[in-house]
Image: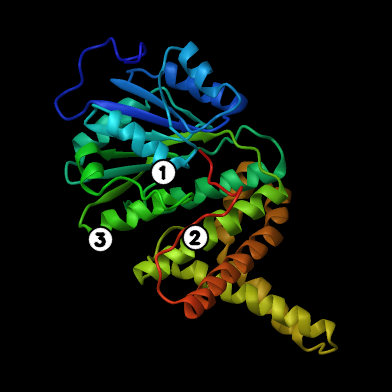
Amino acid sequence: MSSLLSNEADAPRGEAVTLIVPVHNGGARFVAALRAVADLRPRPEQVIVVDDGSTDGSADLARTMGFEVLDAPARSGPAAARNLGAHRAHGDLLFFIDADVEVRNDCVAEVRRLFREHPEVSAIVGSYDDAPSEPNFFSQYKNLFNHYTHQSARDQAYTFWGACGAIRRDVFLELGGFDVRYLCIEDIEMGYRLKDAGHRIRMDKSLQVKHLKRWDVVSLFKTDFFVRAMPWSEIILQYGHFDDDLNIDIASRIKVVMSWLLFASTALIYFWWPSALILALLCAGMIVLMDAPLLRFFARRRGWWFAARVVPWQIFYYFYSGVAFAWCCARRLVIGDRPMRQRLAGLEADQ
């Protein structure tokens, strides 16, 4: 048992927290994440670090810092690692965080309060904060966009979130934990199962963590397209419905269509149909108009020049998100309605 268990008064009945951190080669960001966990006040009743086949000494580091460490028998991905931690946990509430986030020191108190005030809720998800640690454009853009998306979401959520999410342990075990077939977005799939089983998930915007990940253009596109958009599209097709929230709401779907029309009309201009320029300008204008609240948010946080630089990347984001969904629809027509097995080598979600 961890030497960093709470030495304060025992948590009230039903509020004991087990914090679970899966890691694979966490590096310097993992060190920062563990230091933040060590500074939690009050502390969780149990902290479990699950080492998923690290080769950089992440497990030894966690042990040196006094944390309970479970070694996965083989590298199997974050879903299996989180399940391993959950089965060792003795807390009433399982609080999952990623190995590259810094928790605020009041996170445990916040999780307990939220479940106490919302007894009808089975799971709670938080948000990235609005102060990303990495200063380069793509890190600021991606992490701030994620913050805005969560902060603009409905309180009644439909997805779970492994980077900062808590769930009642009995509910988690009843559902069989995360589906280990998924090497990415296993938390989103868990959210769909929670909702289908009649459980409630709450999006709490005050429960925030700092994302320490550094993004560049390659990692951003690779993660968005292969690790997020494609498997999420498969899940939507598997469960047979969209939800009007987060970045698949109705407005986002319209912007996807506009981005496709923009790219198509731009191609027509190239093939000597100058009148297509009008359609291209109309589509671009429509996207900017619909994104006005987001762009104002970027301007407030980082200035109007930053917001202007975001525009082409947002249009590209809508375009390739639509490509991913179209590809998955075509794939489904060809191979039929088979259970998805996400095995994209080298494209695992963050742990």
Query: Reading the chain from its start, which is encountered first: label 1 or label 2?
Result: 1
Q: Is residue 97 left or right of residue 287?
A: left
Q: Is residue 39 left or right of residue 276?
A: left
Percent from the top left, x then y, of residue 115?
A: 23, 37
Label 1, secondary structure: give it.
helix
Identify the residue position indicated by label 1 in the image: 79
Mark 1 closeness class: few <14, some 14–19, many ≥20 residues within 10 Å: many
Q: Quadrant of residue 303?
A: top right
Number of numbered markers: 3
Mark 2 closeness class: few <14, some 14–19, many ≥20 residues within 10 Å: many
Contact (Cβ within 8 Å) of mark 1 with mark 3: no
- Which marked residue is nearer to the observer: mark 2 or mark 3? 2
Identify the residue position indicated by label 2 in the image: 231
Disc 1 and disc 2: Cα gap in Å? 14 Å
Q: Quadrant of residue 14?
A: top left
The amino acid type of the residue labelled 3 equals Asp
Any part of residue 9 in sight: yes
Identify the residue position indicated by label 3 in the image: 196
Percent from the top left, x then y, of residue 228?
A: 53, 56
The amino acid type of the residue labelled 1 equals Ala
Label 3, secondary structure: give it.
helix
Query: Reading the chain from its start, which is encountered first: label 1 or label 3?
Result: 1
